[in-house]
Amino acid sequence: MNVNEFSLQIKVWRSQLAGLLEHTHKSTAPKKLLSKALEELRIAVEELMVAEEELRQQNDWLENAQKLVEAERCRYQELLEFAPDAYLLTDHNGVIEEANSAAAILLKVSPHLLVGKLLVTFIPLTERQSFRSHLNKLHRQEKLHEWEVRFKPRKCEPVEVAITMAAVRDRSGNLIAVRWLLRDISERKLLELERIELLAREQQARKEAEVARARMTNILESITDAFVTIDTEWRYTYVNSQAEKLLGKSASELTGLIVWEVFPDTVNSQSYTLFHQAVEQQVSVTYEEFFPIFNKWFAVRLYPSEDGLSVYFLDITERKQTEKALRQSESRFRRLVESNIFGSTVMDFLGNITEANDAFLLMVGYTKEDLRAGKLQWIDMTPRGYLGLDKQAIAQVKKSGSCNPYEKEFICKDGRRVPILIGMALLEGSVNSCICFVLDLTPTKQLEKALRQQAAELTQANRTKDEFLAVVSHELRSPLSAILGWVQTLQNASLNPATTARAIEKIEHSTRTQIHLVENLLDISQIITGKLEMSLVSIALAPIIEVAIAHVRLAADTKQIQLQSNLDPRVGRVLGDPKRLQQIILNLLFNAIKFTPQGGRVKVDLQRVEADKANKGATSSSSSSSSPLPTLHSLNYARITVTDTGIGINPEFLPLVFERFRQADSTMTRSYGGMGLGLAIVRHLVEMHSGTIRVASPGKGLGTTFTVELPCDSI
């Protein structure tokens, strides 16, 4: 019976009580007894009415409470659905009773399909024992703090999950349900693993960087340009010896200091603007500027990077002085023309030359007799390409009385052309004649041509140097990258012995390659500076060649190249440095193997040659780039020939083979590697042994032959 039904029943009782009272007045029963019973009934009815009111109030309170509970339940459901982490409710055995959307996404199952499933079925078999152990612990604890486990959704990769569990108990303290909070930590785990790997790589890279930095320092110190590096805060981080000389300060004085504080006068200079432009726009910048603090002109090249700025600068004061002298010379020539002390002539506007001084006649190769005979005609002496300029100049003279000086050519009497600078002015008192002042520009043009050629050579030299630095960086980095890759492979404990041996072999090969590159750089640096020394002894060539062949055999076998030799034991001895002689042979052999395709052949011959035959061979070689065979007391020569069946050399490149930094085409560096130093070093070493070297190749794809001739020891 609800409150409304109870209220209705009370009304019925009250009605019955009223009827009973009315009946009592009419009854003959003892009134006293009836009155007492009625009073008790009335009191009971009133108590029932009070109880009715209390029940009504309680009912209202319960309805409000029920609405609040329903609102809280809805809000709980919304929070649960929109929660970023997965939430589950299971019974005490781990059977899922409730799951939010995040849980469904994590487990790759729709929320309604999760209900009724055992949560442990999403745990890999290897981790279920641990999972059950944690679930059992919850029987003794209210809450288990975060612990980690892997979940395995169906047909998906395992997911790393952090779990927090909370117990739900009845009034008796018995576990009746479990609340689960699941948080996907796969990304965090991956980051932790990457951090560990990165730390290991960083430590290894730091060690290798120290070694590379020492080698790079030696290389940078050998650069003839001044070179500094600046970090992103404009602080010096490296200064080479040439920069110390030009800046007048040591590296220790500059390192760590801000450029603009060390040289405050540069703040308002072109350099300040261009330095910032290079860094902000990340573009290379080349410019020239005069620095009053040093009283010098510098040619500056800026190369920005994420770490700051690399600055190359060269003292060009002497060149600038030459250019200034040229400008002053041209100015003096101009003043001399205006002073009428150079060639001059008078002509009418039809082109008839009526007067000319000796300087003009000498310039064009005519005589006074030719002038008087009327043989000097302006139109006949002017190439067709310049007639338009002459017409413009005459029009300007007619309009303003004079014209701006301009350049043209005259055809001399003997047919040659002479470049001139000419200016015209209207003759006073004449309307159809003008005087012309003519300056022979032949010396100036020759000087301009020489300067252009010099500038082109300087530009090419700078470009070659930049390309060389880029190649050096690539060639030094490639072996280091290979070493790093194989070291990381060795760190894998599961490698088999064969792979480990191969890794060690590759590391050794890359290390030797690195050493070879650095030694070539040091050798070429010593050759350039004239500091390369040799220890000469009397020595047989055959053993040296045999050792060199053994050294390159692995490289030849790798490409299945036949390595043949024919060494005449009667050659005798030569006076030379054993180490440098072996370097000559090694460089030639490595060069031959590098440019010989798979399955090719490389052959080394050693023979004794009489002096007259050696001289004949040396002088008859059109492709030799070495100096002529020196005159020596020795009568016999040792001839070393390295022949390959490789890619050959184009005839036009043969004269350039032994030059530094030269390779046959721009793709050679990418296809075959190397810095273009090996053959240049070989040439210098051969010449230091008073020998000659030459190269011959029938053409591209037809192989190459290098011939070295060294004087035999006369002892």
Image (cartoon, rainbow, N blue to C red):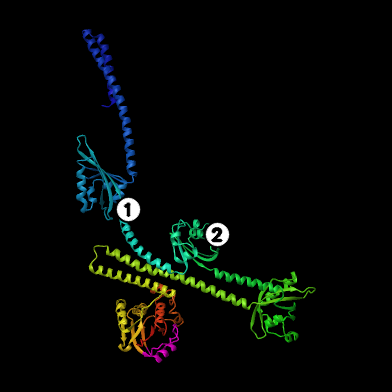
Q: Quadrant of the C terminus?
A: bottom left
Q: Give the residue number, with chain letter if any, for mark 1.
A: 187
Q: Nearer the viewer, residue 118 or 464?
A: 464
The 10 Å Cα crowd at callout 2, few under 14, some 14 to 19, many 20 or more, is: few
Residue 629 lies in the magenta stretch = yes
Q: Position of residue 494 (x, y in %)?
A: 23, 63
Residue at the far front in the pictured view: 715
Q: Is residue 660 above or below residue 374?
A: above
Read off the residue under disc 2. 269
The percent coordinates of residue 393 (x first, y second) are 70, 73
Does the rendering let one see residue 352?
Answer: no
For residue 657, side relative to residue 346 (left or right): left
Counting residues from the start of the chain, the first of labels 2 and 1 encountered is 1
Q: Quadrant of residue 46?
A: top left
Q: Which residues are magenta?
A: 609-636
363 in the magenta segment:
no
Q: Secondary structure at mark 1?
A: helix
Q: Nearer the viewer, mark 2 or mark 1?
A: 2
For the residue carrying disc 1, how many other residues have a C-alpha within 10 Å: few (<14), some (14-19), or many (20+)?
few
Judge by depth and name the residue closer to the eye, 569 or 539.
539
Q: Which mark is residue 265?
A: none
Local SS, label 2 = loop
The amino acid pointed to by label 2 is Ser
